[in-house]
Image: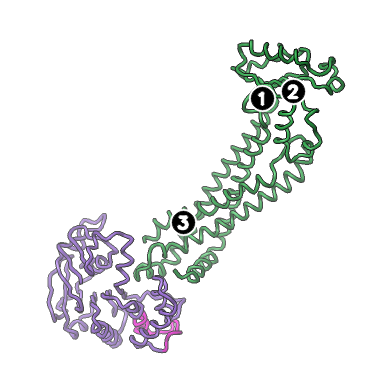
Chain colours: A purple, B green
Amino acid sequence: MIRFDSVSKTYPRQARPALRDVSLEIERGEFVFLVGSSGSGKSTFLRLVLREERASHGQVHVLGKDLGRLSNWKVPQMRRQLGTVFQDFRLLPNKTVGENVAFALEVIGRSRGQIRKTVPEVLELVGLGGKEDRMPGELSGGEQQRVAIARAFVNRPMLLIADEPTGNLDPQTSVGIMKLLDRINRTGTTVIMATHDQQIVDQMRKRVIELEQGRLVRDQSRGVYGYQH
Amino acid sequence: MRGQFVLSEIFTGLRRNLTMTFAVIVSVGISLALLGSSLLANQQVSAMKGYWYDKVQVAIYLCNKNDAENDPQHCDRGAVTGQQKREIEADLKKLDVVEKVYYEPKDEAFKHYQEQFKDSPLASSLTPDQMQESFRVKLEDPTKYDVIASAFGGRAGVQEVQDQRALLEPLFGLLDGMNKAALFVMALMLVVAMLLIVNTVRVSAFSRRRETGIMRLVGASSFYIQMPFILEAAIAGLIGAALACGMLLLGKYALIDQFLAEQIQVVNFVGYDAVLQQLPWVVGVGLLMPSLAAFLTLRKYLNV
């Protein structure tokens, strides 16, 4: 599903690399936590998987494709097989919940009939059945994140990338979001989640990948957060 | 591609930047109107040059049978005779400064006149008989007009020796100067219009960065993401082009038909067909330039 071969990434005009010689493999259907302090390279790791950036050295394979060799015009096709969720939800404030989810399908040219059928289904799945016509501003943070997850998942991606999805939520709401991500994982979708939330990692007992100053320092199946503040 | 979705995006964008859109439309309109006028001015010059202007420098008009009355000073002995014509032609060819001599008989003169003044009422009132025969002379050195004038000026059968360049050159010089000025202002306005478009697209891209960011993430193609911006610019350009077309047609009607054509009847002004011929160019440039400017701006600011 994902393979990093000695991947390094140095941003322009920066002496210190954001990632150094990282090699790892993530299998189909896995649930992986990506932990590490701020600036440890988590975001760079995710940006490389999304091909927002290219590796400076080494190879990044996602869904069987070498992203370093993937030409720019093929990137959109690749991203359609990925779903992405962020800490700040990134919903469109002037569109309803339903329209926000539909937007992801509209812009990749799905038919109206298909959209009408899929959107309520996925909203039901994330626990927002019947809230289709609400505006994001009327929803709680947890509900907004569910909308974002619905949007990320509506295309039934092979891989879901979540960048601190519970970062803005209280612990109880976070548990709900984690249950949802776990359920999505059980449908066969690989989930990679970057997080600072020790409790969640310790509870879930999933694979933990820890980065420190751009280096891979720990890769543990059924791990705990373990990172000392 | 969902047409309705794209359309609604475009009009939201245009509305959001109403002042900027207006500025784009006006500057595109003015620059294109100037482009059209300059193209028309070129047509006007070539229409006025007529058949001979670029080929010869000197015309030797020969007396026809009417000139004995009309111009007794030069043609007191009536129409030119065959003998006189042969002598003139032979003498012309003997001169070193003469490069080439054309003889234009009456019916050819009539034909060229009809071509040049086909839109004018003067053309229909003439008959071939009223036309003058002439020799058209091409000189090795166009400034040596004097040689011809002094050699043939007072000759029997010659009504007048005319240096066509001297007659029309100042006028064409003026038209040419105006034309260049119009082109210069047009280029300037077009640059202004392009800069406005660059700015509009930049603002537009910034205010919609949330949408475009999401589009990128969910895998919308660059084409799909860029299309609304480019169409936005193209539509503004098209409205500007329509404005320019209106100005050209209005100019033709108000300035040429209602004013110049009344004042200066001997000049054959360009007709509506000539104006209409320029409009596709105006519309083409009006569509293409803004789209191109938008496209290039997006490459820089949309990061797709």
User: What secondary structure is found at the residue carrying circle 3?
Assistant: helix
Between marks 3 and 2 in the image, the one whose residue lies nearer the viewer: 2
In the rendered view, does A103 fall on the left or right side of B190? Answer: left
| Range shown magenta | A130-147
Q: Which residue is at the front of the view, A2 or B188?
A: A2
Q: Quadrant of residue B66?
A: top right
B79 is higher (above) or lower (below) than A146: above
Q: Earlier in the sequence, mark 3 or mark 2?
A: 2
Q: Which residue is at the front of the view, B89 or B277?
A: B89
Look at mark 2 in the image and give the residue it sits on: B133
Mark 1 belongs to which subunit?
B
Amino acid residing under circle 2: Glu
User: Residue B222's spot in the image, x, y percent?
Assistant: 38, 62
Mark 3 belongs to which subunit?
B
Look at mark 3 in the image and give the residue it sits on: B294
In the rendered view, does A74 fall on the left or right side of B252? Answer: left
Q: Which residue is at the front of the view, A149 or B199?
A: A149
Q: CA distance from mark 1 to mark 2?
A: 20 Å
Q: Residue at x 63, y 20 (%)?
A: B138
